[in-house]
Image (cartoon, rainbow, N blue to C red):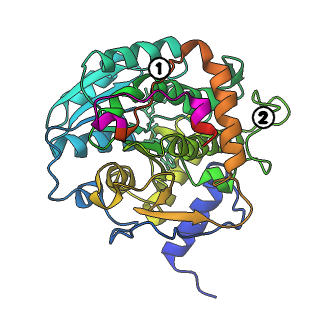
Amino acid sequence: MALSRRKFLRLSSAAMVAPVMGGCSGSDTVPEPGVPRSAFNENSTAEAVTEGMDLKGKIAVVTGCNSGIGYETMRVLALRGAYVLGTGRTLEKAQAACASVRGVTSPLQLELSDLESVVSCAESIRSLNSPIDILVCNAGMRGGGHELVNGVEKHFAVNHLGHFVLVNRILDRLFFSWQGRIVVVSSRAAYRSAPAEGILFDDLGMNREYSDGLAYAHSKLANALFSFELARLLKGTRITSNSVHPGVISTNIVRHESAITRKGFDLWTRLSGKSIDEGAATSCFVATSPLLGETSGSYFEDCNAVTVQGDNHMHDREQASRLWLVTEELTRDYLVQHERPDWDDFKNGVRGKLSPDAVRDE
Ligand SMILES: NC(=O)c1ccc[n+]([C@@H]2O[C@H](COP(=O)([O-])OP(=O)(O)OC[C@H]3O[C@@H](n4cnc5c(N)ncnc54)[C@H](OP(=O)(O)O)[C@@H]3O)[C@@H](O)[C@H]2O)c1
């Protein structure tokens, strides 16, 4: 049987990138019922999904703004008129990124593995004393071997714990937006390559079994479940929380891989993946589309909400609630207690006081 050159390249690059792509569990996705469908798809770019939008007057925070999908997300939100606060692990990286895009942006330092840094970044955001309309929890890392940070496995600490604290510390600023949106960048790895049991509650250090791929997927499942539970806790407010898979895109995310795997990944994404401008489309769409003002707790791929079928934990309510409690326990010293406005009371000028426990019992 003749093999076309393109098919041959796709197969050989897929073989090289197998460790990065992870195994396929056989899970599949179907459109999520009840969520408005968009006309966009895997080929849509961030510019296309925000075409004609005027985001002037809106304030957005994008973590990991100096590279890959985060850079493009910041660039396009700023292009459409939003004032974007972009974070980088060093102020210099964030400054360089902010200076290179059109529009109004400000750089902030944020090192997610250091919860003191998360607190001080949140304080800088709060010091603006302005509503935050959009928060894109985009920053993420993959690879580099087994390491513990704050007593838990590094991917879980950086990709999940850091963003959990950031959201907690600026949530009140999202309450004061006309319609706050939190977008958590997860990954398809969360259901294709995460541990079969889901979150490893009894081994968050991943001391029993470790691979970079497994740890990354575990942290991305934590991202999806965090967003899912946050949406439940925010029910009745005007803040939405959704998670997204951006696509498979050649970015610096593979920096810890061997040269040959990086090359294979680059080749594979050119043939079967997305470009960076396509990769930022789903985040930008979920952050801005007027279609989604009331959509919360959903998971998006290619600019549409999907339900993941098969054996996975993406919509596992019990694990999501447990993860929330465990994460609160792990980060307790860095969290603030919230007064959650009840919007009916809010209209009458009274702030409702609800403890997270009261919300949970609803
Ligand atoms: N690319 C893909 O195929 C793909 C697929 C699914 C999901 N994603 C997700 O998409 C998001 C963006 O990734 P990307 O592909 O654009 O990768 P990238 O080019 O490597 O960008 C990642 C960003 O996160 C920042 N970051 C990494 N570790 C951090 C830490 N400890 N504290 C604060 N910031 C940190 C990086 O800063 P430095 O540059 O300073 O390291 C960079 O700004 C990630 O959440 C990733 O998991 C990507």
Residue at 53%, 18% in the rendered image:
335
Separation of marks 2 and 1 at Cα, in angstroms: 25 Å
Looking at the image, the residue that sits furthest to the front is 348
Magenta span of residues = 345-358
Q: From what the image shows, is residue 272 above or below residue 229?
A: below
Residue 346, x across and y down, in percent: 32, 34
Residue 161: x %, y % from top left: 58, 27
* Number of other residues with Cα within 10 Å of mark 1, as a class: few under 14, some 14 to 19, many 20 or more: some
Residue at the far right: name it: 208
Judge left or right: residue 362 versus residue 251. Answer: right
Tell me the residue at 32%/15% (across/down).
124
Q: Is residue 187 visible?
A: yes
Query: Does residue 155 show up?
Result: no
Q: Residue at x 54, y 67 (%)?
A: 10
Label 1 CB, ligand 1: below 8 Å? yes
Horizontal side of residue 23 vs 279, given as left or right? right
* Residue bearing the label numbered 1: 111
The reply to whether callout 2 and callout 1 are in contact (CB within 8 Å) is: no
Residue 67, placed above or below residue 329: below
* Residue 185 left/right relative to 11: left
Q: Nearer the viewer, mark 2 or mark 1?
A: 2
Residue under circle 2?
201
Say what secondary structure mark 2 lies in. loop
- Residue type at the position of mark 2: Phe
User: Which quarter of the image is occupied by the N terminus?
Assistant: bottom right
Q: Residue furthest bottom?
A: 1
Nearer-N-terminus badge (2/1): 1
| Secondary element at image label 1 | loop
Q: Quadrant of the C terminus?
A: top right
11 part of magenta stretch: no
